[in-house]
Amino acid sequence: MQNKIKAAPTVIYPESDGKPMAETESHRDIMIDFIQMLKHYFRNTNDVHVSGNLLMYYEEGNPRKSVSPDVFVAFGVSKKRRRTYKIWEEGHAPDFVLEVASPSTYRHDLTRKKDLYASVLGVREYYIYDPYHEVNPYFLGYRLMDGVYQEIEFVDGRLPSVVLGLELGERDGVFGLYDPSRSVWLQPLEEQVKQAALAQQRADARAERADARAERAAQAQQQEAQARQRTESELAKTLAALERLQQKTDV
């Protein structure tokens, strides 16, 4: 009896770990805002992939070897959308990772994840931030130096990211990204939409004022032309009357 050749089992890499996206609305909003701001910031830069809360597999054939960074940026990787991120397919691990921490995740973020990002994945910069300041320290940053994470020093109350060319920090209690080259804070998408709407309203108002000025100028020109016509008509009548009077006097 001929033996049947069995196909190798297909390895399934799940697209969800069954865990919620974020613990609180603040955690969720920071994740979404950072992903949107970074996508917008690198919109004109080729081969920069910005994502977050995406299952990342780092050992081919072993679906248990996965992690899901809250926010990550990978350079040298296309911008295409992905259902999962397999490092052996991409050929590149993230260069930047941000974990939005809480008391329940902080120890894991500061130990196992930190070791994984440094020694296994080689993430060049790793940041941990607790929006409620319930852990101490609530904001940390690490940069990979010779395979070991070195803590990043604060500059003007912010942590500079060499990888991004930006700085991470709080402004009026809101965690965000600062662009030192332009001396401006990056705006979340919602704020960008609001500012764009306000700018459009101002532009519309300026256009309406310009139209009103043009209309008033046109009306003034028309009135001036009409007044000139009336003056010329009156002058012509006066001249005609004087001519008739002169003719009578000559007779």
Image: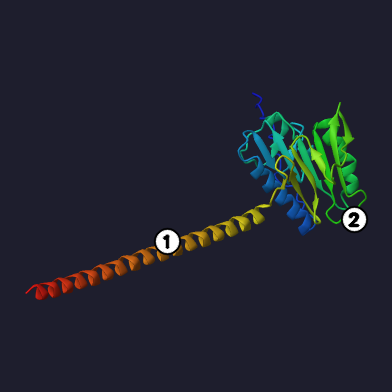
Task: Identify the element where label 2 is drawn.
Answer: loop
Which residue is depicted at the point 55% across and 57% down? 200
Q: Residue at point 52% right, 60% down?
A: 206
In primary-sequence order, the first of circles 2 and 1 is: 2
Q: Where is residue 198 in the image (x, y as percent from the top left)?
A: 59, 59
What residue type is disc 1 on? Answer: Ala
- Give the labeled residue for mark 2: 134
User: In this view of the protein, can residue 25 be seen by the observer?
Assistant: yes
CA–CA distance in space, label 2 to label 1: 60 Å
In the picture provided, is 175 more to the left or to the right than 90? right
Q: Residue at x 75, y 51 (%)?
A: 18
Determine which of the numbered discs, if any, sits on residue 157 in the image.
Answer: none
Q: Determine which residue is flagged by label 1.
A: 214
Q: Quadrant of the C terminus?
A: bottom left
> Callout 2, which amino acid?
Glu
Tell me: residue 203, above or below residue 9.
below
The residue lying toward the viewer, choosing from 18 and 225, is 225
Rendering coords of residue 191 (x, y %): 66, 56
* Residue found at the far top of this picture: 2
The residue lying at 91 percent from left, 52 percent from top is 135
* Residue 185, x across and y down, in percent: 72, 48
Between 103 and 193, the residue placed more toward the observer is 193
Give the image quarter of residue 75. Answer: top right
- The answer to which quarter of the image holds residue 229 is bottom left
Crowd rating for badge 1 (residues with CA inside 10 Å; few <14, some 14–19, many 20+): few
The quarter holding residue 38 reads: top right
